[in-house]
Structures are given as C-alpha cells and as structure tokens.
Amino acid sequence: MYSSASTAEPLAAGYLLGLSAASRCGALPVHPILQYLFMVDGVHAMVSLASRRSLGGAGDAGAQAFSRLFRAGVSVMLCSEDPTISQQTDDPLEAEYCLARTMVGLSEADLAELAHNSVALFNTGASKLTADCRGAVDVAQEDNNESPAESCRTIRERYREGRRSAELSMLARLAPRATAASHAISLGSRP
C-alpha cells in the first residue's frame, strides 16, 4: 500500500518544495539524511503516538520511531491527526502527551520541548524570517565573505539553485549539438 507513512519520497519532495511541517512521517525515523535536513532547516515532524497512520503503527513501533526522531534532534511535535482517535477522548492532545510520557519515557523538560516546538511552528512567519535574515546580514557584514542575500538562503534554496545551474549548463552543452543535428537534417545528411 502506497502512502506517505511508508515511503520517504513524499517527505523529500515536500522538503524540496519548502514545507515547514509534515505529518505521517513513518519513513522519517529510518532516513538519517532527511532527519538531518529537517533538523537543520527547522522542519517540524507532527506525529501521533495513538494513531496507526502517523508513525507506521501505534504501540511499541510508534514509540520507538518517535524516540529515534526526538533523540536525533528533529523538531518533533505531538498532534491528534487521526479523527478516529481524536473522537475517543475529550482532549486528544492531552492524551498524546500522556502517551509520550508513559510510552517513550519523556521527562518534564522533554514534554516542555515538545510544547515549545508546537508553539514555535505556529509563531513562525514573516517576523521570524525577517529576524533570521537580519541576523544573517549582520554576520555577513562582519565576515565580508558572502553577500547578505546569500547568508539568508536555506539549504533547500541553495540546492534548488545548484540544480538549476546544473540543468542550465547541461542545456548549454546540448544546445550546440541540437543545432548541428538540426542543421545536418535540413541539409539532408545525418549528424
């Protein structure tokens, strides 16, 4: 069965497209490179310990996957994404925190970090981006090594620009060949 919980491709595609958070991250705990990219760019992984849809299964498998993400430094936050689970209690998010405390063995500080991640996700916006870029501009002006615009770019932006440059250089190499081939065809000979 194909779903975003069982493969990393939707997570990788979403990352490259600039997502700020992802749910149904069942494939993320077994992909250290994606974990690293999520951690570096501050992409949040919204997971549910009660749902079988979130981390590839409730129970021990979900708790182990959650623990791997949390210990790897990925910005994890709890959510109640499964309507079949969230309808079973009056406060589904509180139930998620209770499960995190008992199943994963998180301390009060760990639970506070999870809550902080949730607040940080919903408080991010133009003001955070402006502050981050302002700080990057100050550092760039001190170092004089890179322009302020370059210092505000994320890994994704640098990756996209690198891919675009590689594609443009490939097209530049292929263009003379295509021109020569079309010229040869118009003259009636083969290239």
Image (cartoon, rainbow, N blue to C red):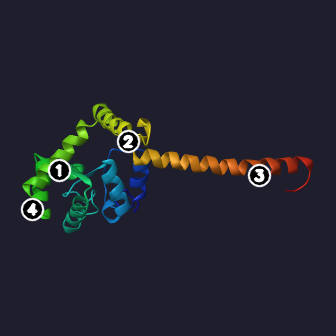
Q: Quadrant of the C terminus?
A: bottom right
Going by the image, does 18 lie left or right of 120?
right
Q: CA distance from mark 1 to mark 3?
A: 56 Å
Residue 105 coordinates in the image, percent (x, y) = 11, 63
Q: Could you say which disc has been placed on residue 114 in the image?
A: 1
Decide: is 64 above or below 4: below
Residue plotted at (68% across, 47% down)? 172
Residue 97 location (% of width, % of height): 12, 53
- Furthest toward the left, the residue is 108
- If the image is split into quadrants, where does the N terminus sit? bottom left
Name the residue tied to disc 2: 143
Q: Could you say whether the residue bearing mark 1 is in a helix, strand or loop?
A: helix
Whole-angstrom CA distance, mark 2 to mark 4, is 48 Å
Distance of mark 4 from mark 1, alpha carbons?
15 Å
Tags 3 and 4 in contact by the CB under 8 Å rule?
no
Residue hosting label 4 = 102
First of labels 1, 3 by sequence position: 1
Tell me which numbered mark, 4 or 1, is placed earlier along the sequence.
4
Is residue 87 visible in the rendered structure shown here? no
Kind of residue at disc 2:
Asp
Look at discs 2 and 3 and give the one toward the viewer. 2
Q: Which mark is residue 177?
A: 3
Identify which amino acid the numbered label 4 is placed on.
Thr
In front here: 135 or 12? 135
Inspect the image, locate mark 3, and give the three-letter code of the amino acid beneath it.
Arg
Pointer 2 or 3: first along the chain: 2
Give the image quarter of residue 33. bottom left
Q: Dot 2 surroundings within 10 Å: few (below 14), some, or many (20 or more)?
A: few
Mark 1 surroundings: few (<14), some (14-19) or many (≥20) residues within 10 A: many
Residue 67 picture location, percent across and down: 21, 63
Instruction: Name above or below for residue 70 compared with residue 146.
Output: below
Q: Mark 3 or mark 4, which is nearer to you? A: 3
